[in-house]
Image (cartoon, helix red, strand yellow):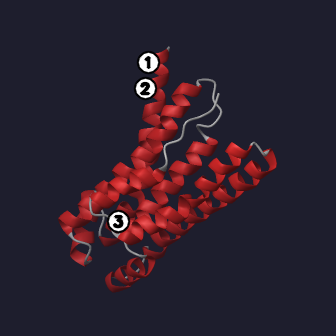
Amino acid sequence: MQTIRITPIALLGVLGLLGVQGQALAANWKVHSADAALWAAEASGDATLQQVVVVADTAVETAAAAASTGVAYAVVGKSGPAILATLKAAGGTATVGSTAGFAVAGLQDKYLYDNCEDQTACDVAAVSGYVGATAGSVGSIGLGMAYGLGASGLASIGGLVGGGMVAGAVSLIALPAVAAVTIAGGAYLATDWLLD
């Protein structure tokens, strides 16, 4: 059975309409640009080409998730100005968080929800991971707009989760990835339950 995939670029377009910075869109385009090559390889029917493209796409998504995690780790233990400088150098919390969210959604799609006993539930979960990354990105951006992305804004956001400025920065970065995992998992369980 051929799996239908929804391109993350369409979801990113929706984010663009909601005011996401162009650099966030560009970062996510880079993360998922190999998907177009994968779809072309699938259309060609060449199994070797498909494997090469899947490996390349996985490497890009893994590197994006690792880089985003690295930025989150880099702010731990730093002073306020150093945290702001680190985030600015990485492109901002929206870029880093959105990149992580879509990378995690892509990895889930390939490894958690690709070949299951209940393929319908897996297909719903795979698409829901991208929806979760989108929702998490919008939530992260909304929090940043509401509280601000300066030292006091990040500290206020961190206060929502019982921390300070570091907790605020890490929360904004992690929110899209956490949403991707949570919404995909919930969609899988709900669909599996409904079909049983």
Compare residues 137 and 4 and report the one nearer the observer: 4
Q: Residue at x 60, y 65 (%)?
A: 63
Contact (Cβ within 8 Å) of mark 3 with mark 2: no
User: What's under tag 2, amino acid-wise?
Assistant: Ala
For label 3, the residue is 167
On residue 129, the disc is: none
Left or right of residue 41, residue 28 in this image: left
For label 1, the residue is 194
Q: Residue at x 55, y 58 (%)?
A: 32
Determine crowd level at label 2: few under 14, some 14-19, many 20+ residues with C-alpha closer than 10 A.
some
Left or right of residue 69, residue 148 in this image: left
User: What's under tag 3, amino acid-wise?
Assistant: Ala
Residue furthest out toward the top: 196
Distance from the alpha carbon under mark 3 to that under mark 1: 37 Å
Of helix, strand and loop, which one carries label 3?
A: helix
What percent of the width, then of the height, locates residue 147?
19, 67
Which is closer to the viewer, label 3 or label 1?
1
User: What's under tag 1, amino acid-wise?
Assistant: Leu
Distance from the alpha carbon under mark 2 to that under mark 1: 6 Å
